[in-house]
Each structure stands twice: as structure tokens, then as C-alpha cells.
Image: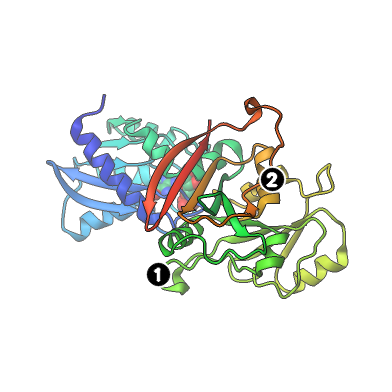
């Protein structure tokens, strides 16, 4: 059992890690706190890929304050890296600075690291501890960890619904069911996701951009998610607004070279991933996104694509923004069933429930 003070400083490091969430991908967003004689002397979190890791930021923060890190305890939400990647190994930097002890919330499942960072520290005579707030640390970078262990991104299906479970009126009107706070939260989710997936139906109906426009951030500093459109027959218009900054990947199930060339000429990428049913092979699409280092995939789609993903068991998390509005007959979240018995129903559990302005945000996980 970890000491109370270890837990306290690790919580601080976890809070810091949240700040890197929109900039760090495809890297995990890590937080680091350096403590000497019970006082925090350095803090840091992962910068954008190719920039400093959390430990280096924290070491520099301490140096900037004129603090000596020799003998200090380093709290880090992920094992310090041991490899030369886009940046040199953090374990080596910590050894060079002669820190006294390293506490890691969890080991790094990246096969390039996988325990070697902590082993390097131990070999240099620096005591280490691991698995302090491990569960929380796993949550904080679940996308990166699933990509490392499963090869595919963490899939989060998001929808805004009325309390009667509708996403739009029968005539398609859906602006706006949820309130401003919910919509702002969706912008945050997009900015933290490596990619956003939708279906061609949604693109044709809404001509959506699916870009991240988080409040209070300079738009030029926002890393745009890759927009992914499942479009079996390549019905996507060349002028679709979803083609744009951040890139657009159109996944189809046809070999129509003319349509593909037209979309490519507008800057979209087109890949053909035909499945047995003549539609896009969604499992293969996730593998393709994993290859492109997408940690977190946000699904913002209509009932057809939502159902296809759910039926294939490809959804890890459902985020519902529920508005206290009764809109009567309208469009549903997904077309599932009809089941003959409730025993066939999919069982999910509430992971968290929060009030967001007028709405509820319900986060569900697969049982
Ligand atoms: C750390 N601290 O803050 C993060 C780590 O290509 P690089 O050099 O940026 O290395 C990326 C890998 O380093 C990434 O895949 C993950 O295993 C680890 N991330 N490690 O020591 C950090 N973000
Ligand atoms: Zn590192």
C-alpha cells in the first residue's frame, strides 16, 4: 500500500497530465511532479509529439526555479521512457540529474519501453515504485494503452439525445437538442481525439466539418483530428466540408477509381476496405487507424453506422448528452434488434453521470 503522501503527489501528477491531452497525441499525455523535503519543486506534462516528455518539462521547471533535484522524488503517471524515439530517454535524464527515487503510476505497455525505463533507474541505484494509482493512470491514457495492446484505438461513440432517446425530429432537425455546455464538451472531445468517424449519410445530410473548435483556444494552435468517413459506394461530394485541415480519410468498399481520383484531387485519402456484406469492414478500418497512430476515435454518426459498430462489438465507451426535452417521434440512436428476449439486450454500465448545464452527460462502458 502506497504512502498517503505518494498518493497525494501522484494525484497532482494525474491532474497535470490532463493538460497535455489535446496536444500530446499520438503520445500518451503524462504528468510529472518532483518533490523534495515535502515541497513540489518541479511540474511538467507531455508537450506535442516531438516536444518534451513530462519528466523533461518538470526537470526544466525545477531548474528555472533554481531548485536542485538531486535526491528528490519524481512522481510520474507513466514509467519514464528508456528509448531514443522522437526524444532521448527520460530515464537517462533522471539518472543524469541524480534524482533519489522514482514513483510511476504504471509501466509503459509500449514494447520499446515495457519495464526497461524502471529497470534502467534501478540499475543506476535509484529505487523505484510502480502501480501507485494505476487504475486512474490507465483511465487517463486508455486510448494509447489500447492501441499499444490491441493495435486499435479506443472507440468512443458520442450522441446528443432528448430524454425520449431521439437524436433528431422525423424531418431531420436536430439543432439544437443539447445545450451549449454539452456542445462545448463535444469540442473538447474532438480536440482530444486522433480521429472522428462518421458515415456518408451524416455528411450528405449535414455537410458537417467535424473539426475541433474548442472554446478559449487559438484556432491555429488546435491539432485537428483526422476526419474519417465510412462511404461504401463513394457517394461523397468533392466539395464536402469534411475534407479539410487535419486530413480526411474516406473508407469505401468499391474499386471505383474515377470517384476515388476525384476525391483525392480535393485532398482526401481514399482506402478500399471491403467487408463480406459489401460495406466497409469496420474492424479493418480500426486496424488501419491504429497503424496511423490514432489512440482515440470519436464516433459521431447516425443510427446505421452506430448500430454496425455496436453489433460488431467495436465500441468501448458511449457518451450520451441527454437533454431534458421531449421531442416525440424522431430518429433513434441506433437500429438494433428486434430482440426476442431481454436476455439478448446489450448490457452496459454507467461509468459516470454528470450535470452539464441543462443536460446530463452519461458515460457508459461495456460490461
Ligand atoms: C515518457 N514521458 O511524457 C511520455 C512518454 O517518440 P518519443 O521520444 O516522443 O517517445 C514516445 C513514447 O514515449 C510513447 O510511445 C510512450 O511509450 C512514451 N511516452 N514517456 O517518459 C512522457 N509521453
Ligand atoms: Zn520520456
**Which circle marks residue 346 in the picture?**
none
Question: What is the quadrant of residue 152 in the picture?
Answer: top right
Question: What is the quadrant of residue 115 in the picture?
Answer: top left
* Between 222 and 170, the one nearer to me in the picture: 170
Q: Is residue 58 visible?
A: yes
36 on left or right of 127: left
**Which circle marks residue 335 in the picture?**
2
Residue at 80%, 49% in the rendered image: 279
* Between 292 and 136, the one nearer to me in the picture: 136
Residue at 67%, 27% in the rendered image: 341
Label 1's element?
loop
- Expressed as whole percent of the image width and height from the top left, the position of residue 357 reads 37, 58
Residue at 37%, 33% in the rendered image: 134
- Expressed as whole percent of the image width and height from the top left, the position of residue 5 reads 18, 35
Q: Is residue 298 visible?
A: no
- Expressed as whole percent of the image width and height from the top left, the position of residue 38 reads 13, 41
Pick whichever of labels 2 and 1 is earlier in the sequence.
1
**Which circle marks residue 217 in the picture?**
1
Amino acid at each position: 500500500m502506497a504512502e498517503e503522501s505518494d498518493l497525494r503527489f501522484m494525484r497532482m501528477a494525474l491532474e497535470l497530465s490532463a493538460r497535455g491531452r489535446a496536444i500530446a497525441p499520438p503520445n500518451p499525455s503524462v504528468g510529472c511532479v518532483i518533490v523534495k523535503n515535502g515541497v513540489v519543486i518541479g511540474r511538467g506534462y507531455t508537450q506535442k509529439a516531438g516536444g518534451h516528455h513530462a519528466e523533461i518539462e518538470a526537470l526544466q521547471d525545477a531548474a528555472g526555479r533554481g531548485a536542485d533535484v538531486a535526491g528528490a522524488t519524481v512522481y510520474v503517471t507513466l514509467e519514464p521512457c528508456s528509448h531514443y524515439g522522437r526524444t532521448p530517454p527520460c530515464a537517462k535524464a533522471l539518472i543524469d540529474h541524480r534524482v533519489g527515487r522514482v514513483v510511476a503510476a504504471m509501466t509503459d505497455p509500449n514494447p520499446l519501453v515495457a519495464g526497461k525505463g524502471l529497470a534502467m533507474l534501478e540499475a543506476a541505484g535509484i529505487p523505484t515504485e510502480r502501480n501507485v494509482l494505476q487504475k486512474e493512470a490507465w483511465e487517463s491514457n486508455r486510448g494509447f494503452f489500447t492501441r499499444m495492446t490491441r493495435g486499435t484505438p479506443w472507440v468512443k461513440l458520442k450522441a446528443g439525445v432528448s430524454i425520449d432517446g431521439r437524436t433528431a425530429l422525423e424531418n431531420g432537425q436536430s439543432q439544437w437538442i443539447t445545450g451549449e455546455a454539452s456542445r462545448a464538451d463535444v469540442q473538447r472531445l474532438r480536440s482530444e481525439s486522433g480521429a472522428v468517424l462518421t458515415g456518408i449519410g451524416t455528411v450528405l445530410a449535414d455537410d458537417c466539418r467535424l473539426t475541433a473548435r474548442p472554446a478559449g483556444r487559438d484556432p491555429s494552435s488546435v491539432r485537428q483530428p483526422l476526419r474519417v468517413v465510412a462511404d461504401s459506394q463513394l457517394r461523397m461530394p468533392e466539395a464536402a466540408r469534411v475534407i479539410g485541415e487535419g486530413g480526411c480519410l474516406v473508407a469505401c468498399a468499391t474499386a471505383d477509381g474515377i470517384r476515388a481520383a476525384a476525391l483525392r484531387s480535393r485532398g482526401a485519402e481514399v482506402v478500399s476496405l471491403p467487408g463480406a456484406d459489401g460495406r466497409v469492414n469496420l474492424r479493418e478500418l480500426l486496424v488501419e487507424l491504429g497503424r496511423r497512430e490514432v489512440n482515440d476515435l470519436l464516433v459521431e454518426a447516425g443510427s446505421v453506422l452506430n448500430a454496425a459498430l455496436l453489433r460488431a462489438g467495436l465500441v468501448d465507451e458511449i457518451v450520451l448528452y441527454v437533454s431534458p426535452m421531449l421531442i416525440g417521434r424522431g430518429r433513434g440512436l441506433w437500429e438494433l434488434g428486434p430482440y426476442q428476449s431481454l436476455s439478448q439486450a446489450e448490457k452496459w454500465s454507467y461509468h459516470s453521470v454528470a450535470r452539464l448545464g441543462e443536460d446530463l452527460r452519461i458515460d457508459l462502458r461495456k460490461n
